[in-house]
Image: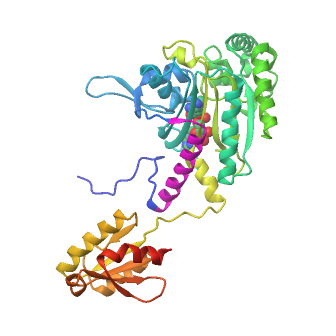
Amino acid sequence: MSNETLQAVRGMNDILPDEAELWLWFEEVVRDWLHSYGYRNIRMPLVEPTALFKRAIGEVTDIVEKEMYSFADALNGDHLTLRPEGTASCVRAALQHNLLYNAPQRLYYSGPMFRHERPQKGRYRQFHQFGVEALGFAGPDIDAEQILMCARLWRKLGLCDVTLQLNTLGDTASRHRHRAKLIGYFEQHLDMLDADATRRLHSNPLRILDSKNPAMQELITAAPKLADELEDDALRHFDEVQAMLRRHDVAFEINPQLVRGLDYYNRTVFEWVTTRLGAQGTICAGGRYDGLVEQVGGKPTPATGFAMGVERLLALLQEDGMALPKAEVDVYVVHQGELASRLASQVAEQLRDDRLRVLLHCGGGSFKSQMKKADASGAAVAVVIGDDEAQANEVSVKPMQGGEQQRVSVQNLAATVNGIIK
Ligand code: HAM
């Protein structure tokens, strides 16, 4: 058996304690913000039937074609996939448990997603999202509210240079008309299409517009525009979203090229982008997906949502010099001798009952070496217990930032510690 050191899978990161402090802080801020808009938490499995993502995201998308971690269950052969995103699972769960038809739902989830992409800064194979879904809402007010929500979060986090890109994809009929025109147009220019575009010509011509191939940019720029096909209803919906954003002073840029990489969208789509993260500048993205519930097997139900990439947001915050809040310890308990050690663990539990954060020294050693550890822990107070203190049911309390050491009874310990901390 080889004894080389094993490494994490490429593109999948460990989050070490120093960084995890920032994650915990961020997750709390985001949860508070979500609750302030009435969103409720839902938790779905990491693994779903592969068919769910094929149906929801679309067979001819990069995610489904190239990026899914799919496998056959070794025991029963079921086709399974590690979720590449959360919207499909959230809709599947809401349908499966009948959450959908009585009242609209505002739901959110968070956790790891998996995509087999080429790893680079801001792009990982296991990454984390907070996803936000409003199911059962048809009007433009919820589209605007979700965008306003994001703007509030960026303010809360002190991010001032993220910009909003906005577009509308219209409804099914206009997209079908546009699709037919695109196929006709590209068929007239077959010699200018690359292999990817040729393959997608009949399955998903819209995705050709997303091509980064410089040789095709002129062709793409002159292609038929979806904007010319939009129905009045969709245009009115989009106008109202924009009017609401203007009323709330949320700046945006209309980007007709914004089509998104998942097929379930219609009408409003948006992306929040920054120029500070290189090529991976989209920190949050989403839009309306009125057809998805039906596609997953339910009755037609309008819906809209978005997801943000946690790694990318934290990278931005760290670039802004956000100091990592370190977990603090209030008390370090130092003890030597058998009686003292028994009292020490009792006292530590008692202090925790009082909501104090306590490190009980483990592993023995001299008072001097234990005091060094107390110092390094950042605790505000050391509680020192030797057998003579233990016999008197007392302890010594030493403020670590200077000040007199004092001996107090076990009953008075919490009050004394709290007095020093305050
Ligand atoms: P998405 O645009 O695929 O949309 O992903 C949303 C966000 O997740 C991106 O803007 C980005 O911040 C982050 N992200 C995506 N891929 C990676 C990666 N490989 N590494 C790091 N971060 C990444 C969705 O997933 C939709 N489910 C959003 C949605 C919810 N639409 C409606 N509801």
Q: Residue at x 72, y 30 (%)?
A: 258
Q: Residue at x 70, y 10 (%)?
A: 173
Magenta residues, as a range? 18-40
The picture places residue 163, in percent across and down from the top left corner, at: 74, 43
The picture places residue 115, in percent across and down from the top left corner, at: 50, 36
The picture places residue 322, in percent across and down from the top left corner, at: 62, 61
- Apparent side of residue 164 relative to residue 80 in the rendered image (left or right): right
Ligand 1: image quarter: top right
Nearest the viewer among 386 and 155 is 386
Residue 226 visible at all:
no
> Measured along the vertical axis of the image, is residue 166 above or below residue 192?
below
- Apparent side of residue 225 relative to residue 359 in the rendered image (left or right): right
Quarter-of-image position of residue 384: bottom left
Which residue extends farthest left?
338
- Predominant secondary structure, magenta span: helix
- Apparent side of residue 283 relative to residue 392 in the rendered image (left or right): right
Q: Is residue 22 magenta?
A: yes
Nearest the viewer among 164 and 209 is 164
- Apparent side of residue 212 relative to residue 291 in the rendered image (left or right): right
The picture places residue 103, in percent across and down from the top left corner, at: 54, 21
Nearest the viewer among 152 and 274 is 152
Quarter-of-image position of residue 137: top right
